[in-house]
Image (cartoon, rainbow, N blue to C red):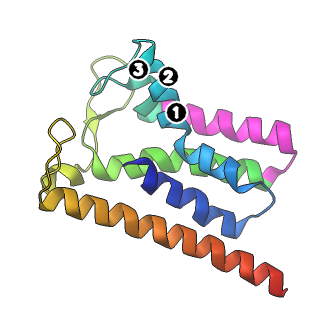
Amino acid sequence: MSPTGHLAIGFAVKRWYSKLPLIWYLIGANIIDIIYIVLTVLGIESFGNNPWTHSLLMAVIYANVGGLLTYVISRQRNSSILMGIVIFSHWLLDFIVWDNLPIAFGKTPLLGLGLYNMIGFNINAIQFNTGLIIATSIELILFIIGVYLYIKSKKLRKVL
């Protein structure tokens, strides 16, 4: 999923627990891709070979480390749990749209439902076809819902 879909999660969770600044949740939702970009620039990962960032094993590790760091910095137990969930949500959303997520390192099976493949989206040859339109629409709808939930919660807090 593109950063737009992941940002939707960051906006949405802010509604349920507002003790952390929004930017923390937005970074948490995209931290796996941020690390992926750094590792790709360093030549450690590449598209289609990304066990250090997009494997199930590393998503669990990043979620736990992110939750722990959040607790160390904020001393808020609920915030740290929620941050771990936000970080792991990145892998869950990618699981829905991709079909090439490794379980761990080496020759492990690849996981994913492959929604993009089903609707005709191919990252190597982006074309304006119905698959791209459907994928973009899904992500924009998720983003709009996430921002809506965030704005609605801000208005509700002002009233209370």
- Callouts 3 and 2 close, C-beta under 8 Å: yes
Relative height, residue 129 to residue 34 (above, below): below
Residue 23 at what x, y percent from top left? 68, 50
Question: Which circle marks residue 34 in the picture?
Answer: 1
Q: Seen in the image, is 35 located left or right of residue 15?
A: left
Residue 70 among those drawn in magenta: yes
The residue at which mark 3 appears reads as: 40
Q: Secondary structure at mark 1?
A: helix
Task: Give the prevailing secondary structure in the magenta stretch.
Answer: helix
The answer to which image quadrant residue 125 occupies is top left
- N-term-proximal mark, 3 vs 1: 1
Residue at the extreme front? 128
Residue 5 at what x, y percent from top left? 43, 56
How many marks the image carries: the answer is 3
Residue 139 among those drawn in magenta: no
Q: Seen in the image, is 41 located left or right of residue 79?
A: left
